[in-house]
Amino acid sequence: MSETSNISSAVNVQIEESWKTVLQEEFCKSYFLDLKKFLQQEKTNGQIIYPPGSQIFNSFNLCPFEKVKVVILGQDPYHGIGQAHGLCFSVPEGVQTPPSLVNIFKEINSDIGVAIPSSGNLERWAKQGVLLLNALLTVRANQAASHHKRGWEQFTDKVIQKISEEKSGVVFLLWGRFAQDKSSLIDSSKHFILKSAHPSPLSAYNGFFGCKHFSKTNELLIQQGKTPVNW
C-alpha cells in the first residue's frame, strides 16, 4: 500500500482521485502524519468525532479539482449529533437548518428570488463546482474548535493555495474575519474575492444581508463563459 493511500485509509476516507494527485505531497509531510496520529489517538481514547470518517473529505469527493469554480470557506464542522457531513454550512437531509445557513438562504432569496428550501443539504452546490471547504475537517462531539491547530489548517491552506496557483477565474466567497484572513493565500490578479460579514445571527446584519454575493458570483462566472450556479 502506498504512503498516500495508507494515510488516507488511516482516517477512514478516500479522497477523490484528482485531489489525491494535486495534494499528494501533503499526505507525506510531517504535519499530516502528526494529524493522522492525533486522529487515531482520539479514536483510541473513545472520542466521538464528527463528521463520520467516510465523510471527512466530502467537499472534495463531491467537487473534483477540475470542476472547482467557486469556493466558500467555513471554519470547523458542526459539533452536534448528525449535523456535520463534510461540507461547510451544510447539514444532511432531515436535519434542522442551522442559523447561519438560514441566513444564507434568506440572502439568496433576497438577492435572486430563489425560494428558501426546507433542506439544508448543499450537496447540489458541491456537484455544480462549489467547494464547500471548512478550515478544520474534524471536531470532537459537542466541543467547537477542539481540533484547532492539529494540522487541518495547514492542509486546507494548501488546498486554497493549490486552487489559486493551478486554476484561474475562481470566485472565493469570504464571510467573516476568519475567512477573510485567507485572502493572502489567493492571487487576486487571476481570481475573484468577494468579502462580507459572516452569516451568523451575530453578524449577518453587519454586511452579509445585502451583499448579493450569489448574483455577483453568477455574473462573474457568466463573464468567463462558465455555467452559473443554480443556488
Image (cartoon, grey):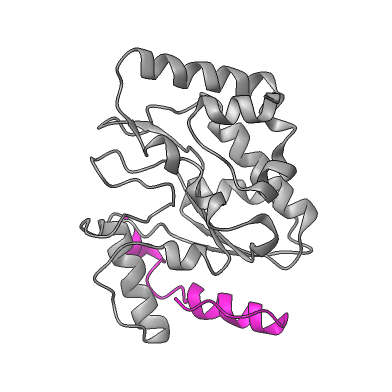
Q: Residue at x 62, y 32 (%)?
A: 154
Residue 37 place in picture, x, y as percent: 52, 16
Question: As displayed, is residue 2 above or below residue 133?
Answer: above
Q: Residue at x 26, y 56 (%)?
A: 98
- When asked about the image quadrant of residue 8, the answer is top right
Relative horizontal placement of residue 77, taking residue 169 as reference (left or right): left
| Residue 147 painted magenta | no
Q: Residue at x 36, y 74 (%)?
A: 107
Residue 218 place in picture, x, y as percent: 57, 79
Residue 225 place in picture, x, y as percent: 72, 83
Question: As displayed, is residue 141 above or below residue 109?
Answer: above
Relative horizontal placement of residue 191, taking residue 72 as reference (left or right): right
Quick one: which residue is furthest to the bottom in this view? Answer: 113
Relative horizontal placement of residue 26, taking residue 128 as reference (left or right): right
Count of marks, rendered view = 0
| Residue 213 painted magenta | yes
Give the residues in magenta. 203-231
Q: Quadrant of the C terminus?
A: bottom left
Q: Quadrant of the N terminus?
A: top right
Residue 4 place in picture, x, y as percent: 67, 29
Q: Residue at x 36, y 60 (%)?
A: 199
Towards the viewer: 89 or 125: 125
Question: As displayed, is residue 60 above or below residue 125?
Answer: above
- When asked about the image quadrant of residue 151, the answer is top right
